[in-house]
Image: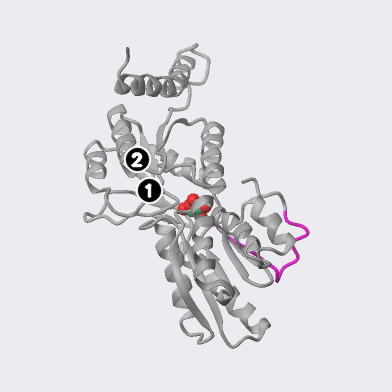
Amino acid sequence: MHSVDQRGNQRLLKRWGAALTAVLLLMLSGCAGKNQRAAEPSLLLGFSQLGSESSWRIGNTRDIEEKASEYGISLMMENANQKQENQIAALRRFIAYRVDVIAFSPIVEEGWDNVLKEAKQAGIPVVLVDRTIQTEEEGLYVCLIGADFYQEGVKAAQYLIRKANRMGKKQLNIVEITGTEDSTPMRRRHEGFMDTIQEDGRLNVLESVNGDFLKSRGAECMRYLLDKYGAEIDVIYSHNDEMTLGALPEIEKAGFTPGKDMVIISIDGGQEAIDILKEGKINCIVECTPMLGATLMETALKLKAGEAVEPLTHPEEKMFSDEDDLSHLVPRGY
Ligand code: AHR
């Protein structure tokens, strides 16, 4: 009989076995013969993914795995299944294993100081991917590679102001379905949106509810909002495609046509949502790209080589809406 801990350790050993084999092969190829070029120094990257809550997240995990293999980097990937304690435990395993670089996508902003102090003491540089954190002490991570979530909220609001002009209405009632409580995209997408609409007297937020970036919660939130406000709702601002995909069938079941009776604004730009935007049931999608893998690999290689890295890298992001010609959009890849 194996204890849960033993089974967990066995699984971990299996997963990391592949990474270790890659490292050994690189070392052996370096000793293969006098005339052969020595192998490039290998790099061991520990990455803690926060979960699998959305097609965005799944696309992000896939991109990081593919780019690690393209760049010849050994990757130890751990999935925390939406739990901060699992992420902290994964970071501690990376430290114990003495990886060259640690990267992680923090599920929430607070609560990382202790484990990051341990990484600092061990001399392992830490890269934040996708989301940021708040720490009491400076210098607990080297850099952040991720979207400008505040600007995403601003873009969503700017679209709505243009839409309100076209609709010619005196008042538009908005409901907001937000992402995971205390996460960076939840906080900044809300702030960017609110700061931008506050000057416009026509735009009125009825309520913000938390949908945790999940399709099932998007549906639940929408049912609650429809029960409470019904036809009063003019606009739904949803913090990600997954929650939007959960909300849309509920709107239809309640007898409304999304995209016509209610303006639908979403964030991410995954293929499924883009197809629905083309059908006219979503009005606007602000892009948030999950393709952060190449920048992460380049950053990790620089850190291993002792080179300076950019403290902040935002990817370029677009918008897709009923204002655009969408006929030439290339497949999204997530
Ligand atoms: O942090 C990025 C956000 O997290 C994406 O918008 C969302 O889909 C994901 O779950």
**Mark 1, residue position:** 106
**Residue 187 occupies which quadrant of the picture?**
bottom left
Q: Which amino acid type is shown beneath numbered disc 1?
A: Pro
Residue drawn where x is 68% and y is 82% of the image:
166
Q: Is residue 287 left or right of residue 105?
A: right
**Label 1, label 2: how many angstroms apart (C-alpha)?**
8 Å
Q: Which amino acid type is shown beneath numbered disc 2?
A: Gln
**Residue 164 occupies which quadrant of the picture?**
bottom right
Residue 193 covered by magenta stretch = no
**Residue 288 occupies which quadrant of the picture?**
bottom right
Question: Which numbered dot is residue 98?
Answer: none
Residue drawn where x is 39% and y is 44% of the image:
307
Q: Main secondary structure of the magenta part?
A: loop
**Mark 2, residue position:** 87
Instruction: For mark 1, give the secondary structure.
Output: loop
Q: Closest to the observer: 101 or 246?
A: 246
Residue 326 covered by magenta stretch = yes
Q: Position of residue 99 (x, y in %)?
A: 35, 31
Looking at the picture, the colour scheme in use is one colour
Q: Is residue 278 above or below residue 118?
A: below
Q: Are marks 1 and 2 in contact (CB under 8 Å)?
A: yes
Q: Earlier in the sequence, mark 1 or mark 2?
A: 2
Magenta region: 316-329
